[in-house]
Image: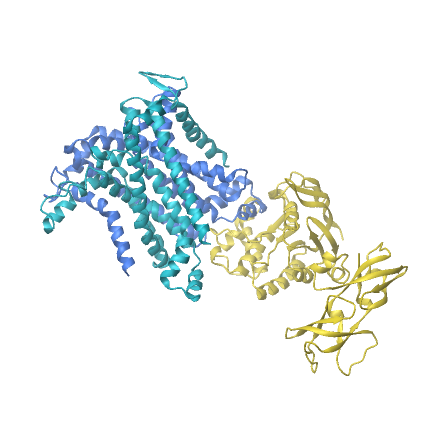
Chain colours: A cyan, B blue, C yellow
Amino acid sequence: MISPPLIYAILMLAIPIGAIVLFSFWTQNFMDVDTTFTLNNYREIIEKPIYFALLQRSLFVSGTVTFVTVILAFPVAYFVSFHVPAHRKSLWLFLITIPFWTSYLIRVFLWKVILGYNGVVNTGLINVGLIDEPLTFILYNVNAVIITLAHAFAPFAILPIFVALEKIDRSLLEASEDLGESKLSTFFRVTLPLSMPGLVAAVLIVFIPTIGDYVTPELMGGAGGKLIANMIQTQFLALNNAPLGAALAIVAMLCVAAISLLFVFLNRRWLRGRS
Amino acid sequence: MSLRIYAIAYLIFLYAPIVLLPLFAFNDGTIIAFPLSGFTTKWFTALTDTKALHNAVQNSLFIAALTSVLSTILGVCAARAGAMYNFPLKRGIIGLVMLPLVLPEIIVAVSLLVVVVQMLHMSLSNWTVIAAHVLICTPFSIAILNGAFQNLDPSMEEAAMDLGESRWSAFRLVTLPLVMPGIISSLLIAFTISLDEFIIAFFLTGANPTMPVYIWGLLRFPGSLPIVMALGTILVGLSIILLTIAEILRRRGMARAGVKDKGSFL
Amino acid sequence: MTALISLTGVNKYYGDYHALRDINLTINEGEFFSLLGPSGCGKTTLLRTIAGFEGVSEGVVVIGGKDMQGVPANMRPTNMVFQSYAIFPHLTVAENVAFGLRKKKDMDKAAKDLAVDEALTMVGLKGFGDRQAHALSGGQRQRVALARALILKPKVLLLDEPLSALDKKMREQMQVELMRLQRHVGITFILVTHDQEEALVMSDRIAVMFEGEIGQLADPETLYRRPNGRRVAEFIGKMNFLKANVTNVGDTIDVNVDGLGPCTIAAEQAPSGINLGEAAVGIRPETLAILFDGQTTDRETIAGTVDEVVYYGDMTYYDVRIDGVAETLNIAMKNLIGRPVLDVGAQTTVVWDARSLVLLP
């Protein structure tokens, strides 16, 4: 039974990923590809500061988006799990997930409308009289990218945290209070550690995919807000240098994977250190 | 109480962009900004006259329909295997199949691009988009169908076989009706994902763009933005309808199987 | 009595794990047969090899004179009541019961309806046909499972822990109903259970299984009175064990029992082929007694001290320490009128009888 999806995943995922790894060691010669093994692509990435700067900015954006998204999402997940009556929970979850399923492209574009020079925020604030001139720090820069991505990945962060919170046996909280802890210290000593698997899942499921997004930086980032994914896209589609693009994609993936593993490892150590 | 206010504010934040969509779609002005100027349906009328758009919509519908069927079939296989059998390397295999859920989409896109164009020297077409969309939709299908299959008592099919049914008719008479709501909701979700997907389609689309790729092109021309708003309104409305049907079916399925609803499908 | 099912040299391996070890077994027509044992002993695996859900690695399974090798579950003359009952939740009660009739081409709709009605009446669910299956209670689900299996008139009904999901009261009620049902339909029932009381109450014969093999196969009384080894004795009911020394084996057996002294045991109270030397003796708590003040007995007595008292209402269990034995003796006494409950530390006299001793290897 498992073989059809497995074969499909091998053919369409494992082999292609193997192919770009291979590809990253080759070079582009105008229209054809030189298949002699070389580290030139990687050397170029290390030597040209633009790639390092882009990668650094990408990781910073992904990290910030992850942090903001998870911090903002946790109270919502907590509210739905602990304060919403059981029969309303699926309605709440449904409401939270709906925006996620609607056209990503259009959602991103609408943030441009909201944050733009004549956008909703600026016209609103001017009409209220809080500002005289439109704010410019909220469009065509990294801030705009972060806001938009945080919005796009919100349900991704809420759902795993919610699932982890739902699994917590409520009598554990009563036991903690019975043993003399306040509601607040119960939260920090019982609820938060037990929801950690959900938090970790939320962090990974936001952090990893955001690195590969080029739509938001393209539409919202302006000149100073471009990220590594834009560069990968450019190498593949505009500059027709697929080997360099492949190498960039691999470097980006390795960075993300390394940071994720480090995060999981530190989190495990922290949890073990407590108990 | 303050938590509740926060949660509602959060929902408003989530819905803010979507709510603006119809406002501008019916706004009688070419600039997408406040203040609004007046009510019109001309942008919707304009949609019906755009030949290129119709082709893009047709493409997208074709891709989405095939993607949803294929990924649901793969999802049924994986969910059934995962729920009912143990096999060597189970975690690793399920992990690989679920990997596209967290993998940056650009990686899926460029790796398939490299294989198809540079290695196999084939040209891009709707089929390359379908191949990639099936890959990213299958984990969602599995997640939805897992719920349906894990609620299933494995001795149910054995009971049917014990009562004289063959392996296939036991599946058809017992398992299939019980997981049918899950299957339909998987079809709908996969359809929605594929219909809206841009990042991969942009890399892999052939001579005929899909609808999101077509929209991407329109975004560069300020004059066509109101039309995009109108198209977006229809798309979002359609998505919400499909998702609502999927959710209702999922709940009905849970009720039919006599299990308690544990929340969303993810 | 004619043999209906016979298993010869049945072995079952899951990789390295030896789940069934050389099972040889004959089950008769019309018999209520139980497979009893702790969890993981292979009793469910054995049942599933009879049902056809598991193949055998070695050996032969014969049902009704036919070798079942390669015969799938849906072609075997057996039907099963599953531990979870496996009631189809998307069907009504009547549709569940009628499920197996789909392939019966010789029955028309009316005949099928009639059969469903009869089956439901038989299990005491007359008039429940239109109910949705997932709205039933545990006891009702079990009855539906029974009706659904019996409607096909199998030669054998297989029951996999059918009562384990019920509460105590319901369980006792269903035990009696199952026995009545078995007498009514007259076919062979094979019950898998880990509950020794359930097996003793319901069965004609019981096979006690440990670690994939049959430890003892006997009727309930033999099993209780003359367990053939310490494993069986410990699994079924309570038993006191004392070290013993066999001094003579003849028509009867002479034994010197630690704490009790020399005595003579009838040959049927000992395993065949017992040797001289070290052995053990088992005594059921209810075959020992405490001699209360003013009572006399012509049986054997020994002095003891009450070490622990557990009061159960209808019974009191005493742990009594006697000289020369490390473990205390467990003694069960009915709380008859006027009989006191002793305190811990009380000096007392224990009454015993060689007829209730069973010699164990």
**Does B73 sit above or below residue C277?**
above
**Does C63 sit above or below residue C254?**
above
Q: Which quarter of the rendered picture does the N terminus of chain B lie within?
A: bottom left
**Does C24 sit above or below residue A7?**
below
Residue A224, picture quadrant: top left
Question: x%, y% of residue A198?
Answer: 40, 49
Q: Residue at x 35, y 53 (%)?
A: A90
Left or right for C49, reference B142: right
Q: Residue at x 47, y 34 (%)?
A: A6
Question: x%, y% of residue C22?
Answer: 73, 44
Q: Residue at x 71, y 78 (%)?
A: C346
Left or right for B144, reference C102: left
Question: x%, y% of residue B165?
Answer: 56, 43
Question: x%, y% of residue B225?
Answer: 17, 35
Left or right for B130, reference A134: right
Residue A176 seen by the camera: yes
Left or right for A159, reference C63: left
- Count the marks: how many? 0
Residue B266 seen by the camera: no
Residue C241, picture quadrant: bottom right
